Amino acid sequence: MTSNPPRSGAIFSPIPRGPVLDKLDRAARDAAHTQPRFSVARIEKVIAQSISLIALVFGAQTLSIALGSGLVVPEPLGTVYLFSLLGLLVIVIVAGVVSARVQRVANIVFALTYLVAVALWPVVTGGAGADSRAEPWTWYLCAIACGCISQAVRPWLATTYIVITPAVYGVARVIDGDGFFTHLDIAVQDALYGSMIGLVIMVLITMFRRAARTVDEARSAAFTRYDEAVRQHALEAERIEVDALVHDTVLASLQAADRASTPEQARATVAMASDAISRLAALDAPANGPAQTITIGWLIDLLHQHAAHLEVPFDVVASGSVEHVLPFRVAEGLYLASAQAMTNSVQHAGEPCERRVDVDAGDDGVILVTIGDNGVGFDRAAVDADRLGIRISIIERVIAVGGSVDVRSSPGSGTTVSIRWAGDAEAQRDLLEAGEATS
């Protein structure tokens, strides 16, 4: 039989100090503190990849138009002109796949190079094509340049660029070889159209970033509230346990000492005081190691003790083998969750009420603890979201040790809380044999 070391007072701490639950709490806090920009990072990656995709499409279109309609710029300067811009565009595309931060640098270089390229367009072309209404190949890179600058710099800088660059393009596009404007209507249309597309891109990027920041702030605030709620719940659970312990042991010892008039009564008072001190010390005792095991029989005894502590009748019924053993952390989670369900029944089910606790240890390693009453019941949908009794004290505590919880209740029909932990039957036998070998 598994050897369980005798221990006075509560074998489990009233505060959820199990290693699994502690690990979950730490993971939640770490996620909030080490990844405060989780959504922002993801949206930045999406923006970078979107710019890469758009740059690939427009770059291919630009190359096709330039080679099909002519470079306009005299050779060999035309080839240098074209492939300098497209080469930078390839860097933008690759950087978007590798790193959004690297792409920002490439975007700035490309956007500034494009602005210089369109400003020098009348000089390098000699005004060729100014009288044509067909757009030169540089026009198809204007939206890409505006999108790049929107991703790389602050909105006010991007807005300035988006207003200036299409205007420069529009003016440079219609200057002929003599320095005269040939089609001012085209210049105005191109400037307005280019600015409109660029501003739409910039607004969308800004909106996505603000939405991501809002999500991250809400996420961090939620983790903070959850962490605070867990601490407050733990403090309240500890206060209730200590208050009850003081009432049941310390005050009882003092009253017994006050009434003691014989040596036998005095010895009984000393024994009561010693037990009170031991139980108080047990509250802060370190948790048992992960190899420690608890039998189902011990778990049932603890539920009997908790029912007696609540001073409300509970029928605690066991079925199956009480020699089944559980890892300490699992037994701790099942006990604390069951005790909380019993306490909830006492607090909320009303009187008169019949209460029952069934503990079923199956041969397949499945442990089922059912806490039920025929009290007033409640509507789960009407429970405030900030009420933590069921969600944290019962459900999350059981989930943390690999179990599941089913809560069924309706007004006037009582409440049933089913706590299930599906262990491995072979592992159960190994634990039992190991316990017998060390007995």
Image (tube, grey):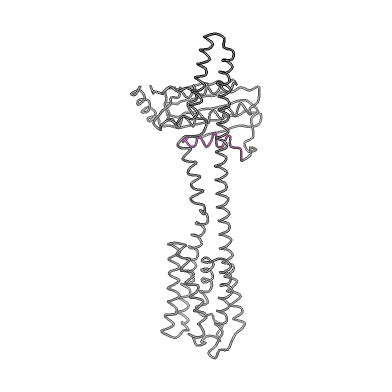
Residue 355 in the magenta stretch? The answer is no
Specify the quadrant of the image occupied by residue 339.
top right
Q: Residue 28 appears at what percent x and percent y?
A: 50, 44
Q: Residue 376 appears at what percent x and percent y?
A: 65, 28
Specify the quadrant of the image occupied by residue 242.
top right
Q: Residue 260 appears at what percent x and percent y?
A: 57, 12
Q: Residue 396 appears at what percent x and percent y?
A: 52, 37
Please give the range of residues in magenta. 386-403
Comparing 63 with 198, the one in front is 198
Comparing 256 with 80, the one in front is 256
Please determine whether, in this image, residue 40 is positioned above or below residue 375. below
Please determine whether, in this image, residue 311 is positioned above or below residue 387. above
User: Which quadrant, please, contains the N terminus?
Assistant: top left
Q: Residue furthest left?
A: 437
User: Which quadrant, please, contains the C terminus?
Assistant: top left
Please determine whether, in this image, residue 371 is positioned above or below residue 114. above
Q: In the image, what residue occupies the spot 51% across and 25% down?
A: 280
Comparing 402 with 7, the one in front is 7
